[in-house]
Image (cartoon, rainbow, N blue to C red):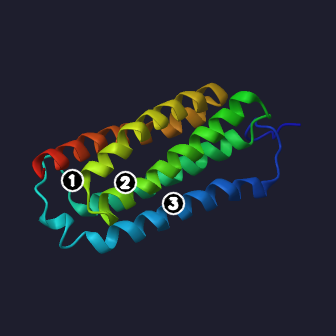
């Protein structure tokens, strides 16, 4: 049976709590690794001219996390299939890499470790966007800004590493 408003299969509302909880946990864990290292370590690094001011990252990640939750909820509410399972596994993997990046770059104070993480993370994000799109077009489109942001973050990570090696 489908929901008349969304056109999606009816699923228990509480399934939406799974991606929301995972994304909130990722945000909190990332902040725990990042904030203690913004000053003086990160502030003291040489950065490229295109490095955004620190205040940009909070709103950007909040927006991305909301879009990630929206997209993942749409995928969870799709009928069970191998593609749906693959999409959710890829989403979980890229989210784990997202969390690990903060710990590798900020907590370890090591741009090279961040770079070692963010390259496969970008590949996972792009794969997730593509599989989400196949499962639910709206979900794939909603997740696309994450691929753009992580692409930019990869360039930024490479630049910070290069300028501070």
Element class at badge 1: loop
Check disc 3: other Cα within 10 Å, few if <14, some if 14-19, many if 20+.
Answer: many
Between marks 1 and 2, how big is the CA–CA gap? Answer: 11 Å
In the image, residue 92 lies at what x, y percent?
59, 47
Residue 42: image quadrant is bottom left
**Of the residues under marks 3 and 2, which one precedes in the sequence?**
3
Which residue is label 3 attached to? 26
- Reply above or below: 64 against 86: below
Which residue is label 2 attached to? 60
Image position of 134 (left or right of 61):
right
The structure residue drawn at horizontal position 49% and vertical position 53%, both measured from the top left corner, is 65
The structure residue drawn at horizontal position 51% and vertical position 39%, both measured from the top left corner, is 143
**Residue 139 versus residue 159: which sits nearer the camera?**
159
Dots 1, 2 in contact, CB < 8 A: yes
Residue 37: image quadrant is bottom left
Which quadrant is home to the N terminus? top right
Image position of 97 (left or right of 140):
left
In the image, residue 133 lies at what x, y percent?
58, 28
- Reply above or below: 123 against 66: above
In the image, residue 122 lies at what x, y percent?
40, 37
Element class at badge 3: helix
For marks 3 and 2, give the one nearer the viewer. Answer: 3
Which residue is label 1 attached to? 52
**Of the residues under marks 3 and 1, which one precedes in the sequence?**
3
**Of the residues under marks 1 and 2, which one precedes in the sequence?**
1
Element class at badge 2: helix
Between marks 3 and 2, how big is the CA–CA gap? Answer: 15 Å
The structure residue drawn at horizontal position 31% and vertical position 62%, both measured from the top left corner, is 106
Image position of 72 (left or right of 96):
right
């Amino acid at each position: 049976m489908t929901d008349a408003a969304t056109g999606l299969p009816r699923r228990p509302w509480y399934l939406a709590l799974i991606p929301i909880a995972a994304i909130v946990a990722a945000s909190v864990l990332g902040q725990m690794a990042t904030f203690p290292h913004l000053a003086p370590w990160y502030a003291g690094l040489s950065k490229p001219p295109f490095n955004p001011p620190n205040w940009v990252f909070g709103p950007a990640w909040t927006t991305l996390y909301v879009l990630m939750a929206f997209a993942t909820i749409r995928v969870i509410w799709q009928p069970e299939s191998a593609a749906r399972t693959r999409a959710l596994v890829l989403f979980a993997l890229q989210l784990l890499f997202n969390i690990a990046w903060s710990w590798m770059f900020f907590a370890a104070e090591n741009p090279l470790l961040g770079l070692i993480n963010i390259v496969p993370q970008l590949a996972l994000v792009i794969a997730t966007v593509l599989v989400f799109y196949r499962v639910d077009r709206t979900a794939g489109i909603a997740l696309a800004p994450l691929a753009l942001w992580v692409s930019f973050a990869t360039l930024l990570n490479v630049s910070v590493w290069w300028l501070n090696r």
